[in-house]
Image (cartoon, helix red, strand yellow):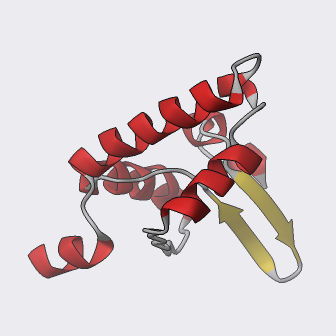
């Protein structure tokens, strides 16, 4: 399946599964803006794919911190970085996402 996926989308670390049931692509990313989601649609449209965006918002600071510690610390973005520094950096990244974030419901209401 991945051989027919536009190369730019492959570089974005999409995960692809195919079989007799059809095909499924999971694109796990922070797609905070309408423009970013539109770009994704443009990348997969040539495949005739149907797209579903799932939105998950967590406001529990403790859960966010545990998630950062278990899924971010030690990965390539934070290789060799102290856990406390990684958490602070990722929290700053979240603040930047929040500045440009447009929820799916807001996007739908504007259309």
- The quarter holding residue 81 reads top right
Q: Nearer the viewer, residue 79 or 106?
A: 79
Q: Quadrant for the C terminus, please.
A: bottom left
Measured as percent of width and height from the top left, residue 59 is found at: 43, 68
Residue for point 68% across, 62% down: 25
Q: Residue at x 56, y 58 (%)?
A: 64
Of 28 and 48, the residue lying toward us: 28
Q: Position of residue 104 (x, y in %)?
A: 31, 72
Relative to 46, residue 95 above or below: above
Q: Disc count in the image?
A: 0
Q: Is residue 111 visible?
A: no
Q: Residue at x 69, y 49 (%)?
A: 4
Q: Is residue 58 visible?
A: yes
Q: Nearer the viewer, residue 101 or 6?
A: 101
Q: Give the quarter of the image for residue 75.
A: top right
Would you say 26 lies left or right of 29 here?
A: right
Q: Position of residue 42 (x, y in %)?
A: 39, 53
- 10 vs 31, left or right, is right
Is 47 or 24 nearer to us in this picture?
24
* Name of the residue lying farthest toward the right: 20
Q: Residue furthest left?
A: 110
Whole-percent x, y for residue 1 in the image: 78, 55
Q: Is residue 35 left or right of residue 3?
A: left
Q: Residue at x 22, y 46 (%)?
A: 99
């Amino acid at each position: 399946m991945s051989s027919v996926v536009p190369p730019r989308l492959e570089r974005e670390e999409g995960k692809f599964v195919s079989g007799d049931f059809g095909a499924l692509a999971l694109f796990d990313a922070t797609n905070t803006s309408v423009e970013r989601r539109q770009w994704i649609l443009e990348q997969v449209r040539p495949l005739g794919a149907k797209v579903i965006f799932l939105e998950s918002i967590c406001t529990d600071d403790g859960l966010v911190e545990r998630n950062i510690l278990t899924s971010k610390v030690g990965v390539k973005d934070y290789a060799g970085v102290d856990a406390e520094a990684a958490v602070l950096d990722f929290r700053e990244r979240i603040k930047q996402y929040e500045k440009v974030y447009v929820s799916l419901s807001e996007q739908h209401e504007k259309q």
